Image: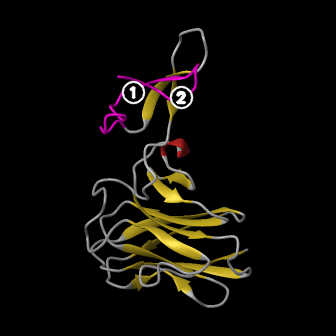
Amino acid sequence: MVVTTGCVDRVIHDLGGLAGGGGGGGQVETDTDTDGDSETEHLPTSGDPNAECSVPQDCGMGQTCYEGVCVGTGSVRVSLSWTAVTDLDLHVRVPNGEWINYASPLTSYGQLDVDDCISGSCVNQNGTHVENVVLDANAPRGSYGVKIVNFDGRRAADYSIQVAGDVEAAFEGSLPNESASESVVHEFVW
């Protein structure tokens, strides 16, 4: 199937049936010049958080690809990843003492937009699991805290945290297979 984008010189060769509603993982072949040779380009295939991706262009507007999952972006993004099938929860403390987490996923300055595993059921049971908090430009400035909780304690888990955007930081840790076990509070300043 060949789909045109409305641009005269750009033709998209729909390799995975995306235009027909099929899967395909976001890779489509494009021809953007007049030599007839095709180049591979990743085009947005989903605006949904939790969509699978391999590059940022696989995700919708205002999103990026983190560990194979489309997550929201903002002034600051705090992303958690782990591989064990257990319900890890990302908690982000803002300078005024409020927490953004599964119990309070939406505030006037940020939100938890991806919450992968719940009670041992994960979007991708065999892959990397992700939770993500996005902070807007109007979020308070100061010291932020990030802690991880092994909510159900089904398995022990190693985790990684990436802070990106106006502030960059990275943290790693491990949690035992105990329900409600908590990490240390990792700190960053914005």
**Foreground: disc 1 or disc 2:** 2
Mark 2 residue element: loop
The residue depicted at 31 percent of the width and 34 percent of the height is 20
Q: CA distance from mark 1 to mark 2?
A: 15 Å
Q: How many marks?
A: 2
The residue depicted at 53 percent of the width and 12 percent of the height is 37
- Looking at the image, tell me whether mark 1 or mark 2 is earlier in sequence order: 2
- The residue that disc 1 covers is 14
The residue depicted at 36 percent of the width and 35 percent of the height is 18
Question: Residue 23 at what x, y percent from top left?
Answer: 32, 39
Mark 1 residue element: loop
Question: Residue 91 at what x, y percent from top left?
Answer: 50, 79
Q: Is residue 21 above or below residue 92?
A: above
Q: Which mark is residue 58?
A: none
143 vs 48, left or right, is right
The amino acid pointed to by label 1 is Asp
Question: Residue 171 at what x, y percent from top left?
Answer: 58, 67
Question: Residue 50 at what x, y percent from top left?
Answer: 40, 57
- The residue that disc 2 covers is 6
Residues in magenta, as a range: 1-24
Where, quadrant-wise, is the C terminus in this rendering?
bottom right
| Residue 13 magenta-highlighted | yes
Figure quadrant of residue 49: bottom left
Colour mode? secondary structure
